[in-house]
Amino acid sequence: MADALATITRAENLGMVTIRADFARAGDAIAEAVGLALPDVTRITTDDSRSLGWMSPDELLLILPVSETAGAIAALEQALTGEHSLVVNVSDARAVFDVVGPHATDVLAKLSPVDFVELPQDGLRRTRAAQTAAAIWRIDGGFRLIGFRSTADYLGLILNNATLAGSQLAPR
Amino acid sequence: MTYTAPFRLPQGGRLIDRAFQIPFRFDGRHLRGLEGDTLASAMLANGQMLMGRSFKYHRPRGPIASGAEEPNALFGLGQGGRFEPNQRATTTTLLPGMVLGSQNCWPSLDADIGAVNNWLSPMFPAGFYYKTFMHPRPFWKHVFEPIIRRSAGLGRAPTDPDPDRYEQAYAFADVVVVGGGIAGLQAAKQAADQGQRVIVLGQSPIWGGRTPVDHKGGAAVVNALVADLERRENVTMRRNTMATGLYDHGYLIAREALADHDPNQGIPRQRLWRIRTQQVVTATGALERPLAFACNDVPGVMLASAVRDFIVNYGVAPGKRIVVVTNNDDAYRTALIAHDSGLEVAAVIDARPTADSELAQAVRAANIPVLTDTGIAKVKGGRHVDGVVLCRQQGDGQQIGTLDCDVVAMSGGWSPVVHLWSHCGGKLLWDEAEAMFRPNPERPPLGADGQGNVTAVGAANGDLRAAGDLERRELPTMPVWVMPQNAPYKLRAKMWLDFQNDVKVSDVQLAAREGYASVEHTKRYTTLGMATDQGKVSNINGLAILSNALSQPIPATGTTTFRPPYTPVTLATIAADARGDAFQPLRKTPMHAWHEAHGASWEPVGHWRRPYCYPQAGEDRDKAVNREILAVRRSVGTLDASTLGKIIVKGPDAGKLLDMLYTNMMSTLPVGKCRYGLMCSENGFLMDDGVVARLSDDTWLCHTTTGGADRIHGHMEDWLQCEWWDWQVYTANLTEQYAQIAVAGPKARELLQRLGGDIDLSQEALPFMTWAEGQIGGIPARIYRISFSGELSYEIAVPAGRGLELWEKLHEAGRDLNITPYGTEAMHVMRAEKGFIMIGDETDGTIIPQDLGLGWAISKKKQDYIGKRAQSRSFMKQRSRWQLVGLESLDKRIIPDGALAVDEGTNANGQRKTQGRVTSSYYSPTLDRPIAMALVRHGPDRMGQELEFPMPSGEVLKGRIVDPVFYDKEGSRLNG
Amino acid sequence: MLILTCPYCGVAAEETELAPGGEAHLKRVGPDGDDQQFEAYMFDRKNEKGVHFERWRHAYGCGKWFLAARDTNTLQVYGTYRAQTPHPTDDIVAAIRKVSPDWNPDWTRAE
């Protein structure tokens, strides 16, 4: 029996912060407060432990170890004092899955109307996975997918279904 | 076991492997085929020409084609959950142990009782049903309809669940080439050479299309091309993949058969591809047309191309003595191939006055007679061809001779497969020289950029010589729509156009006489082209007959609309993974597993599942609900309110925005307080409600209904982005960030105090409609003093990840208080006892707040809010609008939800006039009697009056109009 | 199934990633409008066979509303632009006129 197309793992202990602001005015302050460069449109910047994703023209998503969340929120609020902005903890609102393996792209191709082959190395794509919203970017050996917490079981199911051994998309 | 089959040729058959025999069963008989056979070739090799019965007259049918257009040789395939009706024998690969059953016959294919319809056929002309089943009227329901229903539908649907997996996948390309024949492969190579990302889709397991059959060196050319393409990084070659439809902006749907041949290997059986491409090349080839001569439906009459396909591809002789009848040169290939295979070719009958092309000369050189200006007056034979009666094509069918034969190979010319080209708006033109419709290169389907995004190549583009011997010039096809040209009615009534649905030349002519001038109408009147092949075989011939009958040129008649799918797609492939638990996303709260473990009976609310109630041993749902309500009213209960929408609205202009979104004033809400608010659509109708809390100077938190969270968030963003985009406001939908638990009942405060924490829960510190923040039981929380039950009630929001922890702590701490989890139904009943409205019960998209006695929640001070202008329309201000009241049942019976209160008199349809309807109705365990809410004309002015609610059973329930607040009118219980 | 490019994030999104919002460039009529004006705002829609301006939200994406100019008959997309644009841009008008030289805007530019 062949192997599954990819391994699906639920990523735990991630903190997430939604930041809404006018980047033209507050971008530098945000970057400094979170310690990451401001991502370009539809990109994500990252260091060893944190990532900062572009979600919308006035929205960023900071992903970091959960223990650093409160500190990061405080730092952001401090940095954005006097600036019209919204900094809010969304760590508990999300379910995160890592899709890793030689055919990880095939797994996503079964779920999303997106050409992931063409996704830049630092690209972040918001789309849908089957019938639910998702944001997807590259990690070592595959992709990370975030969706809503309430649909975690559904996401886990459709991701695992898509990894069915022998179902890779290359012509047979 | 040595392999013998009466019609298997001693050699040849490029697709079969004679070393491997394959046993299969047909209608209980044990037969053998060879690896590489299709069902059709294996059956023909066994001499089984009879493969079905036509739909209407149950006439015997053999295969006429060798590909996807086959209308006759259809079988029910497989058993149990894998049973599939109407599988085409010509495209189904033979597998070991296959079990096939014939369709549309009883008791057997050979002795079919329904064939009596055939003898009665003069009584069933086109439009028979429309004309016959009209009178007397009552007969329709009790006599005609049951009979028609019993005989309707071809094949039977499977009844067991499909055990196999199916999936879908997206693909992206610069160019998709549809068709694996020579034209498609060449087009793919051309695109690949330019560095484009190319996908090639071939409908069958082998590449090459007609070329290896029609071209002596064809196979080598194809193999070289395929090998070249398969080596390339930028080319994907996908076999067994049928492109079924082309849609807007280069969206192509294709079905790939992965494991149809072996569903047990554990991979998806079929895959539906959703492909986005910049350009599509249709290299879909052409389909051969039958000729319309009398009794052209007798088994053994086949398309000329199919006859040579069976010989060359499978080493199968459809018959031993063949007559070829044609109006073109291409069919001469069949004569040559049959002759070279050792079969006898009695003659080539050519309708054209002369035949002297190279192909015709080659046939004559092989000593095969060529008879020009000749046609077939009639085929002899019943279940099998015995011979043909010859006539002059230019005449009226007078016999000039006969020929014995067991197969007639006919060719009426070729029609390019223009389906994909046409699906998304490509236009056709009539090619007079070849008597065919072909793509009009001036009017292709357009892409998003307004440029053509489909190119037809090869035979699909009308280049009918693309697959054949390019060195041999061929003479034009002569249009022959009826054979002979002046055939009398007797012959025309036996000339089949649609072989499955039994539509004949005479039927189309009758439709024309009866005024069916439009081809679309004629199609539906006669059922021409409505069989499972969707007109692939019959369409062009039928509309040519119609055009002649209407004395107009063929392009003036036009074609029927080509609609996807090109060949049938299984429902399983369309559903694919979306079945069972993956049918749709099921949203679960953080406490979902607890509810499940405690026996929750679920209620779907949007994609959420919420506990309706938690029945205990021996309880039904009603009993459980009543117990839960009384527990809350007497002590304390918990409701999982996590599904409620929670939207944060922040910014200098947030108050201004909320004043526009809600009917009441939110900007004046003091920090720390809560206010119930209503949201209306711009059309004035109530669409959502909920409690708004002011968190800080510039921040509000808006609760929405469970179903409304995403919609209301979208509504807010719509107005913010599109209308008031200069207002400084940010919103965020935090619904899933928090678990929220309603703790309600006289003991609620006591229970919460037991958990400990830094929030003062006293009446003084946290009065009704306020909120506080801190921690409770060691969990960071925001507590709202709000109540939907009328009891002392707190809603506690904690991070979703800690919701279960809080829930369990509450239940642990409240054990001696008889703490009871309650579900949505207890919540519904308790709110109704209090006269609180519910969006979706008291509202239905036509109700304004004023109808519900909610005028107090509409600010009179505000200049504007969404819906205000609409609510000032005269109809909205009418006093006679139905308005909310309570309803007391007069005989202790529950008046059903939705029941209508009748008024005096009848309307124009003779129905009783109505004056109101029940919107919510329950048994109240608190009051031990039914309670209801209703919308009634002038309701609030009619307290004490009685209304009548007739039931479908004829009995009439009575209710008295009362105040909608049934319980604790003073609100004394709110503070515990 | 359409593909429209979101002018905010540049993503060419397919229809299933978008939510439709009806005709674009409607001008809101509030409490001051008379019945006729309000009716026109609320209900009168052009429903063109041909050049059409419509609202779309990149719902499964950046969440922004944008406007699209397209031909409902040929499916050609003339362009997409931000929702805060009072009238279709000059680029859009030029793209339409390239295909339909006789087409005329039914608005007057308030410069």
Image (spheres, coloured by chain):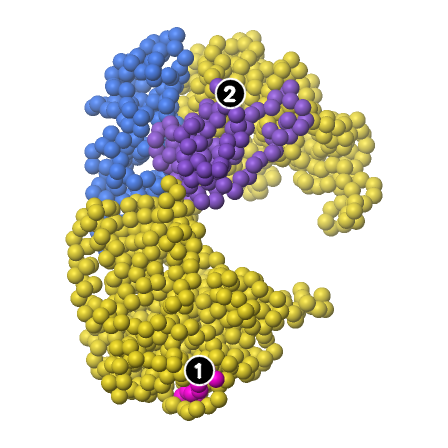
What distance separates the C-alpha of mark 1 from that of mark 2? 74 Å
Colour in which the image shows chain B? yellow
Q: Which chain carries label 1?
A: B
Q: Nearer the viewer, residue B507 or B942?
A: B507
Q: Nearer the viewer, residue B130 or B854?
A: B130
Residue B272 magenta-highlighted = no
Give above or below for B604 relative to C32: below
Q: What residue do we see at 44% from left, 32% from top? A: C93
Give above or below for B574 relative to B406: above
Q: What residue do we see at 50% from left, 31% from top? A: C105
Tag 1 and tag 2, C-beta contact below 8 Å:
no
**Residue C110 numbered mark, or none:** 2
Give above or below for B691 relative to B925: above
Amino acid tagged 1: Gln
Q: What residue do we see at 35% from left, 81% from top? A: B354
**Residue B93 numbered mark, or none:** none
The residue that label 1 is drawn on is B393
Residue B728 seen in this snapshot: yes
Query: Which segment did they paint magenta?
Result: B387-395
Q: Is mark 2 on a helix, strand or loop?
A: loop
Where is residue B263? Give x, y as percent.
31, 60
Q: Is mark 1 on a helix, strand or loop?
A: loop
Colour in which the image shows chain C? purple
Where is residue B253? Give x, y as percent.
37, 51
The reply, left or right, for residue B229 in relation to residue B710 is left
